[in-house]
């Protein structure tokens, strides 16, 4: 016990692949004073029974990048740390049964090409060349990834652990975390072996992450939104024919993933390994009669092969070789699931100097990259690439146990599902309802969830197809298209109203609040009685967030930001507040809602409803009565037309909404708003605005005030970039698109070379064109430059536009 480490810079909780990778990356970066504690032996949780598959494939740009890094690292890790590993790079075939699946493969292959991955879309006959035992009935084609494979999870974890130890880090096995305390700025991590004082603590506890997370609750934490699912796969006995083939060709079969049926099938030694993600899935430890055991190390659930019968039969028809051998061993083990199936990697919500690194459904494939990302968060306070897709703060206060269970069951059962742009998953809905939710649905509102809040995406009429099946398409046109066009025409020609529940809304007040905020944002603040946009940068000058600031008084500021940014932006503001308590921070998100009333007749419409002065200019702010209720009127419209945002208490929104509708406004939804903001070139958070881009690259230099005296974060980096020039620049492009618009992170080409990527795309109904926003090589960011965008495998001609809105370029309608 005498050599037990009583102090550490970082304590990592959990000895699976993610914890070991985090420790390895920290130590390799020079942070050797770090300790990992594990309640049992390394790999005792989900890692030991993991199948060890290592795909690059992901429909998420950030996750693909993370997996690509990890698999590249694995290919040299054995030599890097001098620890032998079984890592088989066999390649994989993903099977497609439909046009829609083939389009998904085309999109992912294009993303992969941008990242240096040589994925290929194939015909059924071409796939047979890679897998001679596979039948190709009922297939439209497939996707080949030559760098897919499988690795021994235990060996991988031990290799990472050895590498961490070699760099000076410590690992304490059979050392559970029994408690947590805080003394000053330090954590006190309690274990049976003693206490460890640490600056930072990281929760990498796998399916125990929720239990560990509860220890952070007294210090501002929350219940971790996750559920433990039962995942089964089985290994066959050796198959003589497979052994003979393997010995003859000298390598293993590629992995087969029939993603439309929902299983993977891969060679394991001379047998096969079948792992389905069954619709009739099962969660564990979610009811009182199935409590989570104190220790489940190296344990499994009872076999439940009946759940897999359909998938076994389909796989045997696909690869008849599977039916030639009996089941050698069945694995039914716990696997943690976040509601969307992606892990949580990053700052622990509400807790300083604490991080999450858990809820991995593909922990072996993602563990290497996750360690890199976590170490960057810990060491630098930021990551090389934007990782919002896995940021724990993407989940806020709506993720109660019922929600998490419903979503985990849905996500597991649709593990390989396609995520269509107009499709809304039905489980876990109606968590937060606006004051007029029933009115919106009665008007035909087809709802979507935004940080748990239900908003209308479009408004259906009698006879419209509102089925879930109708939304399962990549095509632009569906039952919504005609209605969206009509909604936009109403806004263009008359007046429309959009209810925007869930805007993240913060109030900062106190002596010097204005001067404090000037030191945080890149630009200037609006004057009292005015509203303006401000941007927060990190020390690289990259975009952390965008907020609108309404100046009620010199020292009283209202900041409004995206719904999903609530916890991210609240934490950003609170972490930068003066430590002397001179300023007050309040979160008013749940207290108020917003109506956007916009269109050329919106002034006439509101004139009969409000005491406000509707002659005040664009970006003005005033308090007034609307329909006899108090409201804040902000002369602002994300739709790019004359309009006002009406901010009011929740209880008053129904009366105001009824009055606006009765006065002639047509309700419109989020789909219409997105189309109209694209025509104006307005950016959205974590689409067009992210830490992948600096403010100068994003074309936002007008919001950077280099000559102000405040030394705001990122100022030096932006000055340096301004002097040397940007390599990429944000542009608006019109696209000669087919039936689909450019999705996020579609690859842009010029003369056959990759030159950039799109950040969003949609059809502009007012301009009659497909529009893409994106970042391309700076020398090409000239009006008239012709490039090509890969949209689901189709190379579509696109033309760079002038740096001004496509609709109402002089903003005459907006300022009318």
Image (tube, rainbow, N blue to C red):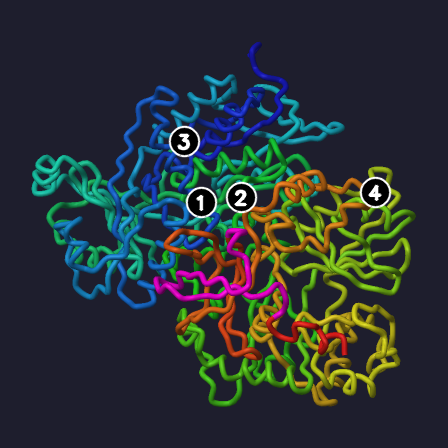
Tell whether position 715 is magenta: no
Q: Is residue 9 left or right of residue 301?
A: right
x and y percentages locating residue 693 in the rendered image: 58, 49
| Residue in the picture at 69% in, 84% down | 495
Cα separation between marks 4 and 1:
39 Å
Residue 65, numbered label: 1
| Residue located beneath label 2 in the image | 385
Q: Looking at the image, do the residues carrying marks 1 and 2 touch, with CB atoms under 8 Å apart?
A: yes
Question: Would you place residue 557 above or below residue 161 in this image?
Answer: below
Label 3: how many Cα within 10 Å (few below 14, some 14–19, many 20+): many
Observer-side mark, 4 or 1, equals: 4
Cα separation between marks 2 and 4:
30 Å
Q: Which residues are magenta?
A: 777-805
Quadrant for the N terminus in the image: top right
* Direction top: furthest residue: 2
x and y percentages locating residue 304 in the rendered image: 30, 50
Label 4: how many Cα within 10 Å (few below 14, some 14–19, many 20+): few
């Amino acid at each position: 016990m005498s050599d037990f480490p009583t102090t550490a810079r970082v304590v990592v909780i959990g000895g699976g692949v993610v914890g070991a990778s985090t420790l390895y990356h920290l130590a390799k970066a020079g942070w050797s004073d770090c300790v990992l504690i594990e309640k049992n032996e390394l790999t005792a949780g989900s890692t030991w029974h993991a199948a060890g598959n290592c795909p690059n494939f992901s429909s998420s740009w950030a996750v693909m990048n993370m997996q690509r890094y990890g698999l590249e690292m694995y290919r040299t890790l054995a030599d890097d740390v001098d620890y032998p590993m079984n890592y088989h790079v066999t390649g994989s075939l993903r099977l497609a049964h439909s046009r829609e699946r083939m389009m998904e493969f085309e999109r992912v292959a294009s993303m992969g090409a941008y990242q240096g991955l040589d994925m290929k879309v194939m015909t059924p006959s071409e796939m047979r060349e890679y897998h001679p035992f596979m039948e190709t009935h009922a297939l439209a084609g497939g996707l080949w990834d030559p760098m897919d494979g499988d690795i021994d999870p235990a060996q991988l974890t031990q290799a990472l652990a050895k590498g961490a130890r070699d760099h000076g880090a410590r690992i304490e096995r059979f050392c559970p975390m029994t408690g947590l305390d805080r003394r000053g700025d330090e954590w006190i991590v309690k274990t049976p072996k003693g206490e460890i004082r640490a600056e930072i603590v990281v929760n990498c506890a796998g399916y125990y992450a929720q239990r560990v997370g509860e220890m952070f609750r007294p210090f501002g934490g929350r219940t971790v939104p996750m559920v433990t699912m039962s995942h089964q796969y089985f290994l066959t006995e050796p198959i003589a024919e497979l052994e003979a083939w393997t010995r003859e060709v000298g390598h293993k079969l590629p992995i087969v993933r029939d993603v439309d049926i929902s299983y993977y099938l891969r060679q394991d030694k001379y047998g096969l390994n079948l792992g389905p993600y069954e619709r009739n899935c099962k969660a564990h430890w979610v009811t009182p009669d199935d409590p989570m055991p104190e220790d489940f190390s190296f344990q499994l659930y009872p076999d439940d092969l009946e759940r897999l019968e359909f998938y076994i039969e389909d796989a045997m028809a696909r690869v008849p070789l599977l039916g030639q051998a009996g089941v050698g061993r069945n694995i039914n083990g716990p696997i943690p699931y976040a509601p969307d199936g992606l892990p949580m990697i990053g700052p622990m919500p509400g807790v300083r100097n604490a991080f999450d690194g858990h809820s991995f459904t593909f922990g072996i494939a993602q563990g290497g990259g996750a360690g890199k990302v976590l170490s960057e968060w810990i060491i630098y306070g930021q990551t090389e690439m934007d990782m919002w897709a896995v940021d724990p703060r993407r989940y806020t206060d709506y993720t109660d146990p019922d929600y998490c269970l419903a979503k985990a069951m849905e996500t597991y059962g649709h593990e390989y599902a396609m995520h269509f742009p107009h499709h809304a998953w039905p489980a876990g809905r109606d968590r937060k309802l606006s004051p007029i939710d029933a009115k919106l649905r009665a008007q035909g509102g087809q709802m979507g969830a935004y940080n748990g809040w239900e908003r209308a995406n479009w408004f259906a009429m009698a006879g419209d197809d509102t089925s879930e099946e109708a939304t399962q398409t990549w095509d632009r046109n569906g039952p919504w298209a005609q209605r969206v066009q009509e909604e936009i025409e109403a806004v263009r020609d008359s007046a429309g109203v959009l209810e925007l529940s869930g805007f993240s809304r913060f109030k900062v007040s106190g002596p010097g609040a204005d001067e404090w905020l000037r030191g945080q944002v890149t630009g200037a603040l609006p004057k009292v009685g005015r509203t303006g946009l401000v941007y927060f940068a990190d020390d690289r000058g990259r975009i952390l967030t965008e907020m609108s600031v309404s100046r009620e008084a010199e020292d009283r500021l209202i900041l409004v930001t995206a719904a999903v940014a609530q916890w991210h932006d609240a934490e950003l503001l609170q972490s930068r507040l003066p430590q002397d308590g001179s300023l007050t921070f309040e979160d008013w998100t749940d207290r108020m809602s917003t109506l956007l009333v916009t269109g050329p007749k919106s002034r006439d419409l509101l004139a009969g409803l409000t005491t406000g002065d509707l002659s005040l200019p664009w970006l003005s702010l005033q308090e007034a009565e609307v329909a006899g209720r108090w409201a804040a009127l902000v002369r602002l419209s994300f739709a790019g037309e004359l309009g006002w945002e009406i901010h009011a208490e929740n209880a008053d929104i129904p009366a105001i909404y009824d009055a606006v509708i009765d006065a002639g406004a047509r309700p419109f939804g989020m789909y219409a708003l997105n189309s109209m903001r694209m025509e104006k070139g307005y950016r959205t958070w974590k689409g067009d605005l992210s830490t992948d881009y600096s403010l100068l690259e994003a074309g936002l230099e007008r919001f950077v005030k280099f000559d102000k005296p405040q030394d705001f974060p990122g100022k030096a980096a932006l000055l340096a970039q301004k002097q040397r020039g940007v390599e990429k620049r944000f542009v608006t492009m019109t696209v000669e698109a087919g039936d689909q618009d450019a999705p996020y992170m579609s690859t842009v080409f010029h003369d056959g070379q990759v030159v950039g990527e799109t950040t969003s795309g949609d059809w502009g109904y007012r301009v009659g064109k497909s529009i893409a926003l994106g970042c391309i090589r700076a020398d090409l960011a000239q009006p008239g430059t012709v490039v090509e965008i890969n949209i689901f495998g189709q190379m579509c001609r696109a033309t760079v536009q002038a740096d001004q809105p496509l609709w109402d370029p002089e903003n005459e309608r907006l300022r009318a």
